[in-house]
Image: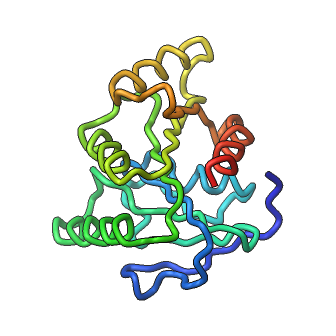
Amino acid sequence: MNVNDVKLECTAVNKTQYPIDRKPEVAFVGRSNVGKSALINYLVNRKALARISSTPGKTRGINFYNVENKLYFVDLPGYGYAKVSQKEKESWVKMINQYLTERESLRILILLIDIRHLPTELDKTMLDWIRGNQLNLIVVATKADKLAKSDIQKHLEQVRNTLGLTVQEYILPVSAEKRFGREELWELIQDKL
């Protein structure tokens, strides 16, 4: 998809701050530093729309990006490791849980997994939650550029097996760095919307 008009609509820490126009939403979930913001930038063809950091825990609110005035990409804080207080981690869990359980505009959850590592128990818990709530799911294996091309399929199978993905559940290797997987992911998003 060719994206010409995209902007940060708002950053929310509770549901009273969410956009109210009911555009369909595609949310990006995954561990801290898995590449959620980088993937959003890649999908909308921008370098710095979503702020990227090598330090886990950079995204601290829920960022709503208005894409072509047709849908929102929603960048959620990462789960797992982050150098923040336990109190702040608990507030993130509450904020993410509220969004995921109460947001009627949520149409697709994109679960990001670093292709170089096996999914964690937190990743499995998130996948179980997505399935239990019968949401449209796309699993994206990020950082595929960090592997030799000949190793990508083997790692995809390891991720698929660890998560117990069904044949109907997509897993797509993507690299924002080497710029591949963008068109395929847009096709999946558009099909599911």
Rendered view: 17 above or below 152? below
Rendered view: 114 above or below 59? above
| Viewer-side residue, 134 vs 30 | 134
Could you say where residue 63 lies in the image, as x and y percent from the top left?
51, 71
| Viewer-side residue, 190 vs 111 | 190
Left or right: residue 165 versus residue 21 is: left
Could you say where residue 114 lies in the image, as x and y percent from the top left?
45, 36
Could you say where residue 34 lies in the image, as x and y percent from the top left?
44, 45
| Viewer-side residue, 147 vs 139 | 139
Place residue 92 in its image quadrant. Answer: bottom left
Residue at the image point whose x is 37% and y is 21% from the top = 161
Q: Of all residues shown, which one is farthest toward the top?
A: 150
Could you say where residue 83 lies in the image, as x and y percent from the top left?
27, 59
Residue at the image point whose x is 56% and y is 30% from the top = 144
Rendered view: 191 above or below 165? below
Left or right: residue 5 versus residue 149 is: right
Q: Quadrant of the C terminus?
A: bottom right
